[in-house]
Image (cartoon, rainbow, N blue to C red):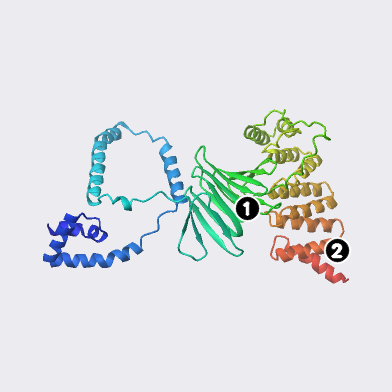
């Protein structure tokens, strides 16, 4: 064995990847060659330090996103090349293919197949780490995770989903890699789910309903009679206990409806219709057509599309896009100058089943129009309802300003003072801080 051959095999020797005959030859060479022995000691010192600097492998979620991005890039049509470049590609393609084959053969020659006992097994359904513990627990479908108050745990599912469970909580793992079925009996669960493949499902069951996702980031809180879901990214399908379906998007929160009361005695009740006879509504097509009509200022077409879709549908599930279409109808009425009708349309969205962000936006828009119409009393009431609908929503500051200014416009000094102090407490350097201080200073100057 030459020095070059021995030095090329030093790393494989330390890692135990050489077969018995090659290992004996390397050891025999090292006993007779001082230079190679020194090189072997250098590798023994450097390898541990170099491997500590190796970056951690990507998480399954990041790896899947990389695969999706690579597939997307590969699906793009390649740019057309001129005839000269195509000729070079024809000449180089066999050479490149041959080089790849040689590299693969060379790598396999230095890496014999591991014994059967070392072949990695299939990944577990879920891996859980809790608190500061370094050890990870492997969980199979059917496992139950119970956390006391003040504890949390992180779970990594083999289906490319990251979960954070906060106690007190009870979570049941079910389903398989293609059809994940979680049951959150109690507690808070934050989930980040990679995009699912066609035919795959990911469901979280709660005491008051369930959530179905395809790829998103959301938080669910399970409390009997008070469960909710908040979507941070993407969109989820939410089903109440009575199977009513809602579509909840990013920035929206859905509170599950309380279980329906028991059905009346069939003997004393009149026969009820239990068959939906209304035609189906294609939400994707209708909402897209309505938005296009609004952009084109064709408000008559907006009403002709929205009104049939929002008509009462006896014995039917509410359509998923009911809230979205109602908001678009109100926007079209406002844009067309029908302010009073727009106010009424906005206020119909102040429903318990509507997302809190939508309720706040609608009430704030109604209050703005009411101020424009000179109805400051109603405007102030709707600004306050907008704050109640989403106390920490995106329009919190604007709603506080509107309530303060509306109270001042109606001459209600006490209400204006309360609103001004509330605004300064929340936004001491806000957009209307100077106006709020003027109201407070004026009240102090007048005395009790």
Of 211 and 139, the residue lying toward us = 139
Residue 444 x/y as whole percent: 83, 71
Q: Which residue occupies the extreme front position in the image?
A: 267
| Residue at image point 22% right, 59% down | 13
- Which label sits in the foreground, 2 or 1? 1
Question: For this rendering, which residue is in front, 217 or 24?
Answer: 24
Q: What element carries label 2?
A: helix
Helix, strand or loop at label 1? It is strand
Residue depicted at x 78% and y 49%:
367
20 on left or right of 161:
left
Query: What percent of the width, then of the height, locates residue 89?
Result: 28, 36
Quadrant including the N terminus: bottom left
Nearest the camera: 186 or 230?
A: 186
Question: Mark 1 = which residue?
Answer: 185
Above or below, comparing residue 310 to residue 227 in the picture: above
How far is mark 2 from mark 1, CA to CA?
Answer: 47 Å
Q: Which of marks 2 and 1 is nearer the N terminus?
A: 1
Q: Where is residue 441 in the image (x, y as percent from the top left)?
A: 80, 69
Residue 236 placement (x, y as % from top left): 60, 44
Using a 10 Å C-alpha cutoff, classify the residue at mark 2 as few (fewer than 14 neighbours), some (14 to 19) or many (20 or more).
few
Establish if 245 lies above or below 387: above
Q: Decide if residue 389 is on the left or right side of residue 200.
A: right
Read off the residue under disc 2.
414
């Amino acid at each position: 064995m030459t020095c070059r051959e021995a030095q090329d095999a030093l790393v494989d020797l330390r890692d135990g990847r050489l077969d018995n005959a090659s290992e004996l030859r390397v050891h025999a060479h090292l006993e007779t060659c001082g230079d190679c022995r020194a090189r072997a000691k250098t590798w023994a010192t450097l390898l541990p330090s170099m491997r500590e600097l190796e970056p951690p492998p990507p998480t399954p979620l990041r790896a899947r996103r990389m695969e999706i991005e690579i597939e997307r890039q590969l699906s793009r049509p390649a740019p057309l090349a001129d005839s000269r470049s195509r000729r070079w590609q024809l000449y180089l393609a066999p050479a490149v293919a041959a080089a790849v084959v040689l590299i693969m053969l060379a790598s396999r020659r230095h890496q014999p197949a591991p014994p059967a006992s070392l072949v990695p097994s299939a990944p577990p359904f879920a891996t859980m780490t809790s608190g500061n513990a370094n050890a990870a627990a492997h969980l199979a479908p059917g496992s139950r995770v119970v956390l006391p108050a003040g504890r949390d745990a992180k779970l990594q599912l083999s289906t490319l989903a990251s979960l954070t469970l906060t106690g007190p909580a009870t979570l049941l793992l079910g389903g398989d890699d293609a059809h994940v079925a979680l049951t959150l009996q109690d507690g808070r669960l934050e989930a980040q789910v990679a995009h699912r493949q066609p035919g795959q499902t990911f469901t979280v069951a709660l005491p008051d309903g369930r959530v179905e996702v395809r790829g998103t980031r959301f938080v669910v809180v399970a409390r009997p009679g008070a469960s909710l879901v908040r979507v941070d990214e993407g969109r989820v399908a939410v089903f109440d206990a009575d199977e009513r379906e809602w579509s909840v998007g990013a920035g929206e929160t859905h509170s599950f409806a309380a279980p329906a009361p028991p059905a009346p005695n069939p003997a004393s009740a009149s026969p009820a219709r239990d068959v939906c006879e209304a035609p189906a509504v294609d939400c994707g097509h209708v909402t897209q057509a309505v938005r296009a009509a609004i952009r084109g200022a064709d408000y008559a077409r907006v009403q002709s599309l929205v009104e049939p879709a929002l008509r009462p549908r006896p014995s039917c599930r509410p359509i998923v896009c009911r809230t979205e279409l109602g908001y678009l109808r109100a926007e079209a009425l406002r844009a067309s100058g029908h302010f009073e009708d727009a106010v009424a349309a906005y206020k119909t969205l102040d429903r318990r089943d509507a997302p809190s962000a939508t309720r706040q936006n609608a009430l704030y828009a109604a209050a703005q129009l009411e101020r424009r119409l000179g109805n400051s009393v109603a405007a102030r009431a709707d600004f306050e309802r907008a704050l109640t609908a989403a106390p920490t929503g995106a329009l919190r500051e604007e709603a506080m300003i509107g309530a303060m200014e509306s109270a001042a416009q109606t001459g209600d000094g006490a209400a204006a003072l309360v609103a001004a102090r509330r605004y300064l407490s929340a936004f001491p350097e806000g957009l209307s801080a100077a106006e709020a201080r003027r109201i407070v200073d004026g009240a102090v100057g007048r005395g009790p």
